[in-house]
Amino acid sequence: MKVKDASELRGIEANRPPEPKKKTEAPASSASTSDKVSTEVRAQVAAAAQAARQQAGSDRTVRLEAIEAAVRQGAFKPDPNRIAQRILDDAELTATIQALLKR
């Protein structure tokens, strides 16, 4: 379609309400009271996570050494029911997480 007379378009633009002017500078008092950034909490969380990792690592090391000693002595008897239950728990958790992520 070809527009021959643009006067109709100018009339539409003339009836359009003016756009509000954008503020380029916010008042200093409202910005300083509502916007605060703190890294203190993040540092505390990071320190707690690091401590937990170190504790878990040392606990695991001790557990693995005990298992290794039991295997060497021939006394290690894994519980097949416990192993199967952990496999099922892991599969259930994985399926739940995947279902939540698909929403």
Image (cartoon, rainbow, N blue to C red):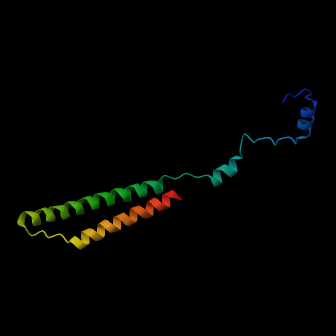
Instruction: Report the side of 35 relative to 85 (left or right).
Output: right
Q: Which residue is at the front of the view, 67 or 24?
A: 67
User: Which quadrant holds residue 83?
Assistant: bottom left
Query: Residue most toward the top?
Result: 4
- 19 up-or-down from 83: above or below: above
Q: Quadrant of the N terminus?
A: top right
- 2 up-or-down from 31: above or below: above
From the top left corner, tell me how far across and down residue 86 is, in percent: 30, 68
Q: Quadrant of the C terminus?
A: bottom right
From the top left corner, tell me how far across and down residue 16 is, in percent: 88, 41
User: Which quadrant holds residue 62?
Assistant: bottom left
Q: What residue sits 49% from the left and 57% below the top?
A: 101
Instruction: Report the side of 41 relative to 80 (left or right).
Output: right
From the top left corner, tell me how far across and down residue 27 is, in percent: 72, 47
Q: What residue sits 28% from the left and 61% below the top?
A: 56
Q: What residue sits 25% from the left and 72% below the top?
A: 82
Instruction: Report the side of 16 relative to 82 (left or right).
Output: right
Query: Residue most toward the front?
Result: 1
Instruction: Report the side of 35 relative to 51 (left or right).
Output: right
From the top left corner, tell me how far across and down residue 87 is, in percent: 30, 65
Q: What residue sits 37% from the left and 59% below the top?
A: 48
Q: In the rendered picture of this protein, how many numbered marks are placed on residues?
A: 0
